[in-house]
Image (tube, rainbow, N blue to C red):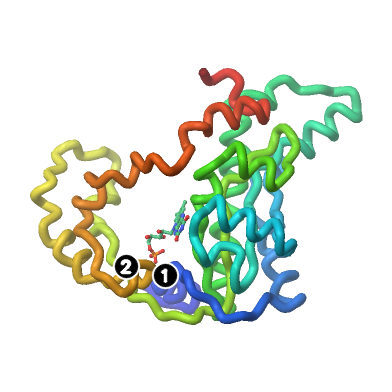
Amino acid sequence: MIHNETIDQQLEHRSIRKFKAETLSVDELTTLYTVFQHTATSMFMQNASLLHITDEHKRAQIRQLCNQQYVGSEGDLFIFVVDLYRNQQIRQQLGQDDGRVHTTDIFFQGLDDTLLSFQNVANAVESMGLGMVPLGTINDHPLEMLKVLDLPKLTFPALGMQVGVPDQQPQLKPRLPLKFTTFENEYPRDFKVSDLADYDAEVTTYYDLRDANRRIDSFTKQITGDKLNDKRIDRDQLPQLLHEQELCLDWQ
Ligand SMILES: Cc1cc2nc3c(=O)[nH]c(=O)nc-3n(C[C@H](O)[C@H](O)[C@H](O)COP(=O)(O)O)c2cc1C
């Protein structure tokens, strides 16, 4: 296995959920923006935008919708946005309206761009000695979040990121052994849950700082738990949100 500064830092990744009461310097912010800008982009379309939320009222509204106290608290809050609006404006203003912008295909193109830029920025954050946590919860109440962010049609807030100076040192969270996740040429279908016994045991030794330093459930318990059926969230609104944003109109 090869080690260098980049790889070692990537292998040290852990989500940070407690930050010191500091915000990014102009230099740090400019660096993250520039890394965002240089991410690979499908067909050179540059279908991603980055919103830095500094308005305290908006941050509080977003925190409430995400229902996580570290969102929009200490540090800096970013929203990574799939952005098909800008290029559609270019087309429309030049008299070349493109109906294909409403297809699932083009939405995925924008989502690819946006998520690649997310991880590029995440790596940059961590390489600067800062920490971050991805925020999927920005889509727990998609229709309300859209109002708070006041985004135009043909945009979609894919993922949030809270960034800052770490004020905690979580344990490294154990991942599935590679034999379960990386394959050559063919996808094996002989997966047996009983093969995960060792990994389950490993996961239960991990302390989650999110939950008052408690050990977490085994991996299989987490997968079979009711995480995906949380009645307090409105993720079922996502198809409606996409359609309201005039995205994925070919996908019922
Ligand atoms: C797409 C995505 C969304 C996530 N959303 C949240 C979130 O809303 N809140 C949170 O605290 N962590 C969130 N996380 C962080 C995961 O919980 C975390 O990556 C996972 O438990 C593994 O832990 P680690 O990042 O410390 O290795 C998210 C991660 C990803 C990739």
Q: Which residue is mark 1?
A: 14
Question: Helix, strand or loop at disc 1?
Answer: loop
- Of 35 and 165, which appears nearest the observer? 165
The kind of residue on which mark 2 rests is Lys
Question: Helix, strand or loop at disc 2?
Answer: loop
- Left or right of 238? Residue 93 is right
Measured in 3D between alpha carbons, the distance from the residue under mark 2 to the one under mark 1, in whole angstroms, is: 7 Å
The residue that appears at 85% across and 34% down in the rendered structure is 90
Neighbourhood count class around disc 2 (C-alpha, 10 Å): few under 14, some 14–19, many 20 upward:
some
Residue 213 % position (x, y): 31, 74
Residue 3 % position (x, y): 40, 76
The residue that appears at 25% across and 52% down in the rendered structure is 222
Q: Which residue is mark 2?
A: 173
Contact (Cβ within 8 Å) of mark 2 with mark 1: yes
Distance from mark 1 CB to nearest ligand 1 atom below 8 Å: yes
Ligand 1 sits in quadrant? bottom left
As drawn, 153 above or below 182: above
Distance from mark 2 CB to nearest ligand 1 atom below 8 Å: yes
Quarter holding residue 147: top right
The residue that appears at 63% across and 40% down in the rendered structure is 156
Toward the right, the furthest residue is 94
